[in-house]
């Protein structure tokens, strides 16, 4: 009989993901309006809230799909750099493609 989990590391990742899903809260209109402008990657339109890890992941996902939500092309690198900086703060790994798109240095490890 084989286990669903091949090793302990895989099981830990599964449990951490489940826990983070339980702790996530939806951002209501009221709470979104209460956030300071600094909690958004693009403050003029209050797009891409990046105040917590789940919203940073969402911002990265939208950007990787080319969904910029009204961010002008001239501002996109700056917005992506803000999102990547927050991702690093929350310990979220950002792929090389996103780093290149932001014009950031990519190192091979």
Image (tube, rainbow, N blue to C red):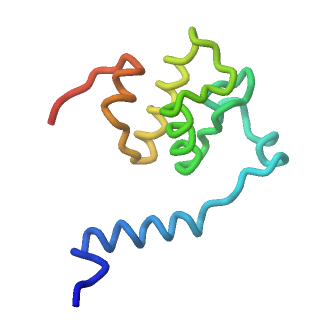
Q: Residue at x 55, y 65 (%)?
A: 21
**In the foreground, 84 or 1:** 1
- The relative height of residue 65 versus residue 3 in the rendered view (above or below) is above
Q: Quadrant of residue 43?
A: top right
Report how many numbered discs are placed on residues in the image: 0
Q: Residue at x 28, y 21 (%)?
A: 105
Coordinates of residue 35 in the picture (x, y in percent): 74, 40
Left or right: where 92 falls relative to 35: left
Coordinates of residue 65 in the picture (x, y in percent): 52, 33
Seen as rendered, the residue at the extreme top is 74
Seen as rendered, the residue at the extreme right is 30
Q: Quadrant of residue 68?
A: top right
Q: Can you say which quadrant of the picture contains the N terminus?
A: bottom left
Left or right: where 7 falls relative to 69: left
Seen as rendered, the residue at the extreme front is 1
Q: Quadrant of residue 97?
A: top left
Seen as rendered, the residue at the extreme left is 109
Coordinates of residue 69 in the picture (x, y in percent): 67, 27
- The relative height of residue 95 versus residue 44 in the rendered view (above or below) is below
- The relative height of residue 34 versus residue 78 in the rendered view (above or below) is below
Coordinates of residue 27 in the picture (x, y in percent): 73, 51
Q: Can you say which quadrant of the picture contains the C terminus?
A: top left
């Amino acid at each position: 009989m084989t286990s669903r989990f091949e090793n302990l590391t895989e099981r830990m990742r599964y449990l951490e993901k489940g826990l983070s899903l339980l702790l996530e809260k939806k951002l209501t209109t009221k709470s979104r309006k209460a956030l300071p402008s600094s909690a958004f990657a693009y403050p003029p339109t209050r797009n891409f809230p990046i105040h917590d890890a789940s919203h940073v992941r969402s911002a990265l996902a939208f950007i990787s799909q080319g969904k910029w939500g009204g961010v002008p092309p001239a501002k996109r690198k700056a917005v992506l750099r803000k999102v990547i900086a927050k991702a690093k703060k929350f310990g979220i790994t950002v792929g090389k493609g996103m780093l290149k798109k932001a014009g950031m240095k990519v190192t091979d490890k």
